[in-house]
Image (tube, rainbow, N blue to C red):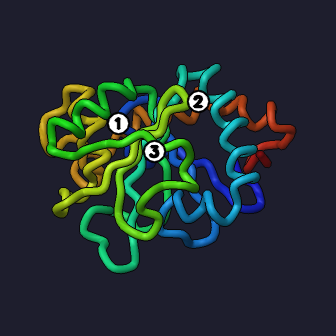
Amino acid sequence: MTSERFALIADLSPLTPGHLLLLPKAHFLSFAQVARHMPDELRRVFDLVTHLYSQTFGVPVILEHGSACNDDHNACVTHAHWHLVPVSGPDMVDLMREDGLRPVVVSDLASAPWPDTPYYLVGHGGILHICHPATPMPRQYVRSLIGRWLGMQDPEWDYAVIVRHELLRETMDLTAWWQDRCGQSAGSADF
C-alpha cells in the first residue's frame, strides 16, 4: 500500500505474521525527522494503517532505530522505517532496560529530545518510549528485541541468516483485503 509520501510493505523476512514496515518514500534518517516535515500526512497514514492492522493482527507496536548523519552504528538500514509488529510494547521497553538503555516517555515524536542523533523507539497504546544509546548497539537491534520476545536464539532474528518465506506469504495473504478496503485494485492501494 502506498500514499504520495509513504509505503507500507511486508518485511521480507518477517519474524512473525504481521511484521510490516512503514517508510517514507523520500529519504529521511528517522521518523523524528519525518514527523517534523509532514506530521499531518504521517498521522493520517498511521491512523489508517493502525485501524487495518488492529482488525487483522491486533494492536501494533512500533519499533524504530532512528539513524543520524554522524553515526550509523546502531541502524542496519539508514532510511527511516517503522517496524509494526504484534508484540508486547511494555515487554519491548523492559528488554531495552535489561540491555542498559533508558527509555523516556515523550509526548510526540516531533518533540523527541534527539531529532538528529540515533535513538530507539517503542510506541504502544499511544505511549512513545525513546532512548538514546550511550554506546553503539548491535546492528539489527530492533529485530533482536522482537526475536528475543518470540523466543528465538541468536541470530535466528537476523534477516540475512534466515528468510521466513512462509511468514511472508501468511502476512501477504492476511493483508490482501486491505487493498479493497482502501479502494484500489491489485497492485497498490492508496492510503
Where disc 3 sits, the SS reads strand
Answer with the quarter of the image where residue 157 lies: top left
Q: Tell me, yes or no, if residue 170 can be seen here.
A: no
**Upstream in the sequence, badge 3 or badge 1?**
1
Q: Position of residue 2 (x, y in %)?
A: 71, 52
Q: Circle 2 is placed at which residue position?
A: 173
Tell me which numbered mark, 2 or 3, is placed earlier along the sequence: 3
Depth check: 85 or 69 in front? 69
Side (left or right) of 170 relative to 99: right
Question: Which amino acid is tagged 3?
Answer: His
**Few, some or many C-alpha atoms within 10 Å of disc 2 (few <14, some 14-19, many ≥20)?**
few
- The amino acid sitting under disc 1 is Leu
Residue 70 is situated, as x and y percent measured from the top left of the image, at 33, 79
Q: Which mark is residue 15?
A: 1
Against 118, residue 2 (above or below) is: above
Mark nearest the camera among 1 and 2 is: 1
Left or right: where 19 falls relative to 147: right
* Residue hosting label 3: 83
Q: Which residue lies furthest to the bottom in this view?
A: 70
